Image: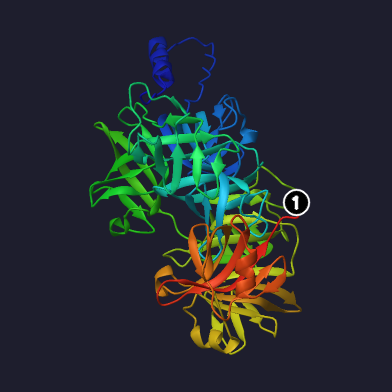
Amino acid sequence: MSIKRSLLSLSVASLLAACGGSDSSESTPPIAVTPAPPVSTNVTTTGVITGFGSVIVNGVKYETNGSAISTDDSPAATESDLAVGMVVNIVGTLDDDGQTGRANVIRYNAEVEGVVNRIDLANQQLRVLGQWISYDDLTEFDDVSLTDLRVGDVVEVSGYRVANGSFYATRIELEEMDKDLKVRGIVSELNAAAQTFMLGELTVNYAGAELDDFGSTALANDLMVKVEGEGGSYDVISNILLAREIELQGDAVDANDGDVLKLEGAISHYLTDESFELAERTIFLDDDTDFRFGSAQDLADGVRIKIKAEYEDGRWEAEDIVFIRDAITKLSGEVSSVDLTASTLTVSGETFLVTAQTQFEDESDSKVRVFDLSALTINDFVKVLGFTNDDAVLVALKVERDNDDKNEIELKGKPSEVGSDFLLIFGNTITVDADTEFDDNDRGITQQEFFSRINTDTLIEVEAVRSGDVLVAREMKIERDDDEDDIGKVEFKGLITAVLENGIQVDGTAVLFDANTELEIDDVELSIDAFLAAVIVGDQAEVEGFYNENNQIIAEEVEVERDDD
């Protein structure tokens, strides 16, 4: 559909010209003129739902009255079936203000829905159905927390693919154990004789599967597919899924010159200064492409971005590219002011700018669905995640309202002052006591080591409790880039897949013991020999340790807990 403009003003002008002037003493009644409807453009968008009151995606509020909404579980869903953090595809129109539009079609499809193989707390990753799922502070967890999540649980993951078999999660939801299993990915290592192929690290057996939407296309490597299986069709130890249905994926949409595409995702197949793929579409660059929070030199496979592109001469050309920033600032506390005109809120003395991209979530008992800056009130307890832009302005990426818990405070930022036993962050004095834990790159260190390694340029995360006018830290952690230290702490949960001569294999990864390793089964401490004699394949283990200079995992502690049933 091409751009439509109202002819109403032209028609009115013609009518007035035809009437001409009049010498009559009778007054001519005024002609009622209906305002022209807003100019709209066809738009296709893929992105994260950041709020409601309509559906807000990629900074645009899409009206949903009359929209055809579908999800994995329902072809005739409603807006109430959608949630903040879901990645959806919208086909509709975009108003000329660029901030509002109408959704004709909204589709939600989970990327992975399956059994948790591993919970890697140190690296902020899960392995689900053989796919690596990364998460961060911006990921929405629904009906579950990382503390409660267990290996063997079934989760639904919304997000986008970073690489084959690797995803970034925008939302993780706990599901029922008998839930059907689903995973989207690219076929590799197709073995027609064995009737198997790989999706990431998952082996798919398609011997009894129905092929859907393939037409004359044969199953082959490099095809994008969605694989479905029944709840009991996956074997955790062998990592094999018996497929019930395999659906060929392809979302080609006819486009006309002037149509708009708004996408969020991770770059793949980047050709320097020419093009890249995003959400399975090829996007071309030119000299007129504008960049925010980065430049063309920052484009690379795996980098997460948001784009606006226009269809011209048979291809999508990027107009704007916004690099998605990590949340390097975290602050929880009471709201002291809200300025709707300036789009700001102030928490614990710090003022954050709220943008059309800011994600809002109400986790308080109120559970307000249409929750935005205008819904906040003074003294609300919130957690704000954000970053500092090039103009030294704190920008809110996510605002989450919680129940009042004013004694437990989280902060993440660079301290303005560092002592031998205290920090000053965001105007808050944070002291330590005998119970404070200190970490550097996820490895425990002493108080003296911690304060000797930090300065006002060090990014620090703090969990603290309020005591009078000061905060007492329960944990202080130095946040470092992954490439600053290759040898770090290991902390993950998984099923034991093999018992070794001097260790165990957990989710396919060797974990070795030494004389300092502490071993427990159901809270009973055991020697290495007794532990190896008692442990069995299929037990669930929690491992804490470190990588040695040979890149081997040496366990400091291994705990096995067996279900009572």
In the image, residue 231 sits, relative to residue 144, either above or below, namely above
- Regarding residue 514, the answer to whether it shows in the image is yes
Tell me where residue 112 appears, x and y as whole percent: 52, 43
Q: Quadrant of residue 6?
A: top left
Tell me where residue 517 appears, x and y as whole percent: 59, 77
Nearer to me, 363 or 446: 446
Q: How many marks?
A: 1
Tell me where residue 536 appears, x and y as whole percent: 61, 59
Nearer to me, 313 or 153: 153
Left or right, 167 with reference to 445: left
In the image, residue 239 sits, relative to residue 219, either above or below, namely below
> At 60% across and 38% down in the image, what residue appears?
232
Image quarter hosting the N terminus: top left
In the image, residue 324 sits, relative to residue 447, either above or below, namely above
- Regarding residue 97, the answer to whether it shows in the image is no
Q: Amino acid at mark 1?
A: Asp
In the image, residue 185 sits, relative to residue 67, either above or below, namely below
Tell me where residue 202 appears, x and y as whole percent: 45, 46
Task: Give the image's coloring scheme.
Answer: rainbow
> At 51% across and 30% down in the image, what residue appears?
244
For label 1, count other residues whose C-alpha is less than 10 Å away and answer few (under 14), some (14-19) or many (20+). Answer: few
Circle 1 — which element?
loop
> At 60% across and 46% down in the image, what residue appears?
155
Residue at the spot of label 1 = 565
Left or right, 256 with reference to 265: left
Nearer to me, 412 or 182: 182
Left or right, 280 with reference to 453: left
